[in-house]
């Protein structure tokens, strides 16, 4: 069974600083995808970044980047130059490459941004 | 605009009164799914559908029904709601091999069963 663990229920960061959200996962498969989703107070689920497990290179999207350690089954999200609009719940999620497979989510990390 | 439309956004109902939450997507996605979100548990899959007339159970299907008669619509039915189904519900659709490119989510339905 696949599992995703986010060990930080809450994190805080000062505006313009950098913060890293942690995520570990467990799967017996070698090919899979990992995601970070953002859920602001509007509760809309927004895809932040996607990583393909067979790619060594860490994904980046503007101020968002990941540190993907496949052997350690770790997938952390780094937010640089934090902005007030980054305040949200962040979910780490995993899916296998098989068709019809589900996204398995972690419990989420609340990120607070201080001005 | 590409989107997943969920209705209603908020719903308060009484135990045992059948209800339907509608979900429609305009992206011609084959894959659609329902999730519930509960504090400390993240999002858990209820049901999913790989195409018209093809549905299957997720991790927490008890007390729910779905149907996929048209590609764009995937309603969630609670035949006899109970208070433990009070939750935030999301419909999602996906492109590519299942969820591999990430889902597009609806705006969520906050359901309270009293």
Image (cartoon, rainbow, N blue to C red):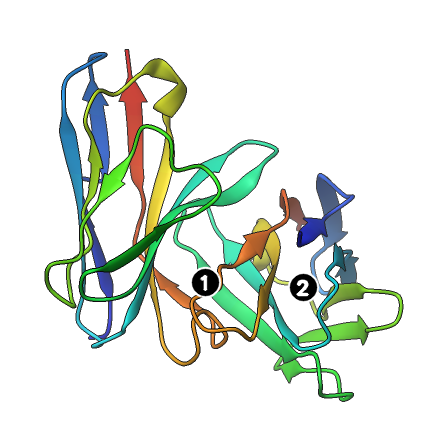
In depth, the one of A22 and A33 nearer the eye is A33
Q: Is residue B79 left or right of residue A110?
A: left
Give me the residue at 52% from left, 59% from top. A103
| Observer-nearest of B110 and B102 | B102
Specify few, some or many for label 2: CA neighbours under 10 Å numbering under 14, 14-19, or 20 or more. Answer: many
Rate crowding at label 1 as few (under 14), some (14 to 19) or many (20 or more) other CA atoms within 10 Å. some
Element class at badge 1: strand
Q: Is residue B33 visible?
A: yes
Residue A71 screen position, x and y as percent:
88, 71
Q: Quadrant of residue A55?
A: bottom right
Q: What secondary structure is found at the residue carrying circle 2?
A: loop
Chain letter belonging to callout 2? A
Q: Taking A56 as reference, is A48 above or below it?
A: above
Question: In whole angstroms, how far apart are the C-alphas of marks 1 and 2?
Answer: 17 Å
Residue B34 can be seen, yes or no: no
| Residue at far right of view | A72
From the viewer's perspective, is residue B9 above or below residue B19? Answer: below
Q: Which mark is residue A46?
A: 1
- In the rendered image, residue B18, in percent from the top left (x then y), is placed at 14, 24
Q: Is residue B31 left or right of residue A76?
A: left
x and y percent of residue B50 in the render? 32, 66
Foreground mark, 1 or 2, reads 1
- The image quadrant of residue B89 is top left
Label whose residue precedes the other's in the sequence (1 or 2): 1
Residue B33 lies in what quarter of the image? Answer: bottom left
Q: Residue A38: give its label.
A: none
Of residues A106 and A112, the one drawn nearer to the viewer in this rendering: A106
* Residue at 28% in and 17% down: B113
Which residue bears the numbered disc 2? A82
Chain of residue at mark 1 = A
Rendered residue at 50%/74% (across/down): B100
């Amino acid at each position: 069974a696949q599992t995703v663990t986010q060990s930080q229920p809450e994190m805080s960061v000062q505006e313009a600083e950098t913060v890293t959200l942690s995520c570990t996962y467990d799967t017996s498969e070698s090919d899979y995808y990992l995601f970070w989703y953002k859920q602001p107070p509007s509760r809309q689920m927004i895809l932040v970044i996607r990583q393909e497990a067979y790619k060594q290179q860490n994904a980046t999207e503007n101020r968002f980047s990941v540190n993907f350690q496949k052997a350690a089954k770790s997938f952390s999200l780094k937010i640089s130059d934090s902005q007030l609009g980054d305040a949200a719940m962040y979910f780490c999620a995993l899916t296998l490459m098989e068709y019809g497979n589900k996204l398995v989510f972690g419990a989420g990390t609340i990120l607070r941004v201080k001005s | 605009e590409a989107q997943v439309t969920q209705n209603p956004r908020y719903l308060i109902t009484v135990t045992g009164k059948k209800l339907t939450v509608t979900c429609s997507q305009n992206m011609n996605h084959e894959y659609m799914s329902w999730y519930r979100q509960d504090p400390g548990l993240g999002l858990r899959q209820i049901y999913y559908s790989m195409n018209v007339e093809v549905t299957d159970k997720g991790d927490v299907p008890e007390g729910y029904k779905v149907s996929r008669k048209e590609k764009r619509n995937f309603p969630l039915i609670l035949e006899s709601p109970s208070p433990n189904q009070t939750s935030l519900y999301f419909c999602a659709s996906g492109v590519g091999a299942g969820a591999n490119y990430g889902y597009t989510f609806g705006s969520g339905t906050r359901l309270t069963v009293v």
